[in-house]
Amino acid sequence: MVSHEITQHMVLHEKNEWELKMPHPLNDRKVAVKGILLPSEWDENGAVIALTLFTFDEDEYKVDRSETTRELLDVLQQELLVEGSYRWEQDRKIIRITEFHLFQVF
């Protein structure tokens, strides 16, 4: 018997209809981009709870929520070279940062 890994997902809509939803073909793509990291959401006390990386070619990567760390908060509004992988979620790119460096021109 041959088994196949299922990579499709069933999504239930408000109308109680099921739709077969394929994963985005570009998920988990490795990327290295240069951009500026800015806060994009705040809690009721004004603390940053979400970050977005804005690139110089007008692209946006929402930073994976598990990645909002003190290290990233310390480099807000600075030019960065960011490495990681991204996935598509609700028509937005979500990046999981594995490494970042301040971008410096010599």
Image: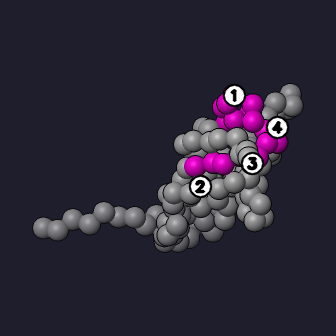
**Which residue position is annotated with label 1?**
70
**Which residue position is annotated with label 3?**
105
Q: Amino acid at mark 2?
A: Ala
**Which residue position is annotated with label 2?**
32
Q: CA distance from mark 1 to mark 2?
A: 21 Å
The numbered mark, 4 or 2, whose residue comes first in the sequence reads 2
Tag 2 near tag 3, CB within 8 Å? no
- The crowding category of the residue bearing disc 4, from other C-alpha atoms within 10 Å (few below 14, some 14 to 19, many at least 20), is few
Secondary element under disc 3, as helix, strand or loop, is loop
Could you tell whether 73 is left or right of 15 in the image? right
Quadrant in the picture for residue 74: top right
Q: Nearer the viewer, residue 77 or 90?
A: 77
In the image, residue 102 above or below residue 93: above
Secondary element under disc 4, as helix, strand or loop, is strand
Secondary element under disc 2, as helix, strand or loop, is strand
Which region shows up in magenta?
Answer: 68-83
Q: Position of residue 82 (x, y in %)?
A: 63, 48
The numbered mark, 4 or 3, whose residue comes first in the sequence reads 4
Q: Amino acid at mark 3?
A: Val
Q: Amino acid at mark 4?
A: Trp
Q: Report if residue 86 is visible in the image.
A: no
Residue found at x 69% / y 54%: 34
Q: Amino acid at mark 1?
A: Arg
Colour mode?
one colour
